[in-house]
Image (cartoon, rainbow, N blue to C red):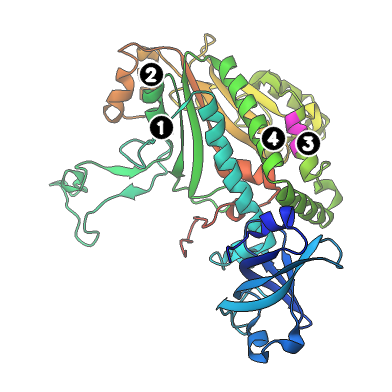
């Protein structure tokens, strides 16, 4: 008999029809009721066993974590919270799970414990819900840009440039680490390496995406990026995924319009296609908030927070205006901000969240940041102090997107590269884009895991990617 996915069965299963389901046992109660889940939905289907007429050895093998196949007939369920159940006629054990060894027994497990069991944790309700949301958001990103006529561009994972100029890169080499080639001066001789030059894992596909924008018009990248940043916060990973669109003939306002449209589209897409998972995560989020001190609790539930973004026009103001708002706030006057507020600082998460959650009560886009705290490639404004940058700030998370209009003036770009010690010889091709038919263009970067954090309400970025990479952790 053809297998029916549990999601399809719950939605369309007809009383009296014969079905086959396959999945993993979540619980087995009273030697009679099996809760089965196959990953297609957060919901289980219940199979009812006639235990008096079932082989006792088979019953002993129906344990939490075991993979089974059940043939049976759909009946109306007498239990609460379920429309139908399966009256089992035959059961086959596809894969045993020894209850003495299987670590995910039916009880509450901490997220810290589950990170140590990354190969099994997607079988839990929380992580399976997050992974399905992750899938739908990834598909939604491709659909959004495809429907707008953007070209999907694959930028290199191995590169010779550090796009951010921060120097926090993972080196790539095939040299013998016990006896690497060296120059006469004793330095590493990368001319003898595989690529004949020093290379690293990419920190951003932006610079290569600008090449695409200067030929195809509108492109986007969506791939892994790497930062060798020794950070153990709940918001940083060493390997994460980035969405980086780059658009010719877009100014800063066009850039802001696109990012607002995209974020609203993606959140709507998740709410439409992940309703069951988000309903579960909303309940989980509410329970989590209850355990926090009153002052730290979110004013909005998870689903309310998503609707808050979709239903509000994003507030747009300059960095300088934001600094004035913060300086005039009660939080500042009562010295309740942990970090100093003054023009020229890189805003901290507490400042960003104040603007979104307390002052404007809607998502905020800040523009025109001081050039000294932004990257070399951003368009310099006429005031000589600021650049045409933009950051999108969300409730509960702070910055979720960073972008800018790009500098197209060759001389100004070279000047900034000199000031910021960005080697021109490595980026000769990037500079040449400004010499051969340059045009106004803009783009932004969205950290995919930051978006998933926001949509799912999870508190730690390590719980929204299947195999998190962070300092001293590459187990899986």
Distance in Å between CA atoms under marks 1 and 4: 25 Å
* Residue drawn at the location 36% of the way across and 42% of the way down: 157
Q: Residue furthest bottom?
A: 56
Q: Would you say the residues marked 3 and 1 are in contact, meaning their CB atoms lie under 8 Å apart?
A: no
Distance in Å between CA atoms under marks 3 and 4: 38 Å
* Residue drawn at the location 56% of the way across and 35% of the way down: 141
Q: Position of residue 457 (x, y in %)?
A: 71, 48
Front-lying residue, 139 or 57: 57
Query: Nearer the N terminus, badge 3 or badge 4?
Result: 4
Q: Position of residue 318 (x, y in %)?
A: 65, 19
Q: Position of residue 15 (x, y in %)?
A: 78, 61
Residue designated by label 1: 153
Residue designated by label 4: 268
* Residue drawn at the location 49% of the way across and 55% of the way down: 469
Residue designated by label 2: 214
Q: Would you say the residues marked 1 and 4 are in contact, meaning their CB atoms lie under 8 Å apart?
A: no
Magenta region: which residues?
306-310
Label 2 vs label 3, nearer the camera:
2
Q: Is residue 254 magenta?
A: no
Residue designated by label 3: 335
Q: Element under label 2?
A: helix
Query: Nearer the N terminus, badge 1 or badge 2?
Result: 1
Q: Element under label 3?
A: loop
Residue 368 can be seen in this image: no
Q: Residues within 10 Å of mark 1 (few under 14, many from 20)?
A: many
Query: Nearer the N terminus, badge 1 or badge 4?
Result: 1
């Amino acid at each position: 008999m053809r297998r029916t996915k549990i999601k399809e069965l719950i939605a369309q299963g007809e009383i009296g029809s014969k079905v086959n389901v396959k999945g993993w046992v979540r619980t087995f109660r009273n030697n009679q009721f099996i809760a089965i889940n196959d990953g297609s939905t957060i919901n289980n289907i219940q199979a009812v066993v006639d235990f008096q007429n079932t082989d006792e050895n088979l019953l002993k093998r129906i344990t939490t974590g075991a993979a089974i196949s059940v043939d049976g007939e759909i009946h109306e369920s007498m239990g609460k919270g379920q429309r139908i159940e399966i009256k089992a006629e035959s059961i086959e054990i596809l894969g045993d799970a020894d209850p003495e060894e299987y670590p995910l027994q039916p009880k509450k497990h901490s997220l810290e414990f589950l990170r140590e069991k990354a190969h099994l944790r997607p079988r839990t309700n929380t992580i399976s819900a997050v992974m399905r949301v992750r899938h739908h958001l990834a598909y939604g990103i491709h659909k959004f840009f495809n429907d707008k006529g953007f070209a999907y561009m694959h930028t290199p994972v191995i590169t010779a440039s550090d796009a951010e100029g921060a120097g926090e890169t993972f080196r790539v080499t095939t040299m013998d680490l016990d006896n690497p080639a060296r120059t006469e001066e004793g330095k590493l001789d990368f001319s003898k390496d595989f690529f004949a030059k020093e290379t690293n894992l990419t920190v951003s596909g932006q610079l290569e995406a600008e090449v695409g924008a200067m030929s195809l018009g509108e492109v986007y990248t969506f791939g892994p990026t790497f930062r060798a940043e020794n950070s153990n916060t709940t918001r940083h990973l060493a390997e994460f995924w980035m969405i980086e669109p780059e658009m010719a003939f877009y100014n800063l306002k066009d850039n802001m319009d696109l990012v607002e449209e995209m974020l609203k589209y993606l959140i709507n897409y998740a709410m439409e296609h992940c309703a069951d998972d988000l309903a579960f995560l909303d309940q989980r989020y509410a329970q989590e908030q209850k355990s926090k001190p009153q002052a730290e609790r979110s004013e909005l539930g998870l689903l309310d927070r998503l609707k808050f973004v979709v239903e509000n026009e994003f507030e747009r103001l300059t960095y300088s205006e934001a600094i004035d708002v913060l300086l005039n706030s009660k939080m500042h006057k009562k010295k309740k901000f942990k970090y100093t507020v003054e023009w020229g600082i890189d805003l901290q998460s507490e400042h960003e969240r104040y603007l979104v959650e307390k002052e404007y009560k809607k998502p905020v886009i800040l523009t025109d940041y001081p050039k000294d705290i932004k990257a070399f490639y951003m368009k310099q404004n006429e005031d000589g102090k600021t650049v045409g940058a933009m950051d999108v700030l969300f409730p509960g998370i702070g910055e979720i997107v960073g972008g800018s209009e790009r500098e197209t003036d060759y001389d100004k770009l070279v000047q900034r590269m000199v000031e910021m010690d960005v080697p021109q010889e490595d980026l000769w091709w990037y500079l040449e884009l400004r010499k051969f038919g340059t045009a106004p263009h803009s783009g932004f970067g969205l950290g995919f895991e930051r978006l998933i954090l926001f949509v799912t309400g999870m508190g730690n970025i390590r719980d929204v990617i299947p195999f998190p990479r962070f300092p001293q952790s590459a187990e899986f």
